[in-house]
Image: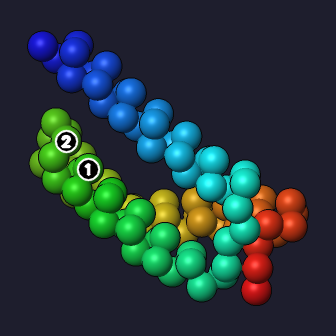
Amino acid sequence: MEKLQAICTAYLEGYFYAKITEQLITGRIHRSDFDKLKKTAVECMKDYIEHSNYSTEEKEELKNNYEHWADVTLKGIKQRLHDSDKLHE
């Protein structure tokens, strides 16, 4: 059963990332959208941590780092969009 759950999770995560990538490739994004994106990413990370099988100690460590992770990730996304001229001011 655990293997089936892992396969389903991988499929859903792949679909999720594919949809995001499709929008990033074909669309243009406004800088103001990044605040909303960061808020959503942080909430998703909180939910992921809460429902994960990590130990309490590991969960606490992840909780201490999820906002930093969101900042670093969004900075990279902004740079790539800027470089590809897909970022609106």
Q: Secondary structure at mark 1?
A: helix
Say which of 26 and 62 sits in front: 26
Residue at the spot of label 2 = 52
Amino acid type for the residue under numbered disc 2 = Ser
For the N terminus, which image quadrant? top left
Q: Are marks 1 and 2 in contact (CB under 8 Å)?
A: yes
Amino acid type for the residue under numbered disc 1 = Tyr
Specify the quadrant of the image occupied by residue 71.
bottom right
Q: Secondary structure at mark 2?
A: loop
Specify the quadrant of the image occupied by residue 61.
bottom left
Residue 84 is left or right of residue 20, and the answer is right
> In x, y percent, where is residue 73?
58, 59
Residue at the spot of label 1 = 48
Residue 57 is left or right of residue 29, and the answer is left
Local crowd size for mark 1, using a 10 Å CA cut-off: few (<14), some (14–19), many (≥20)? few
- Which residue is painted at 60% across and 85% down in the image? 32
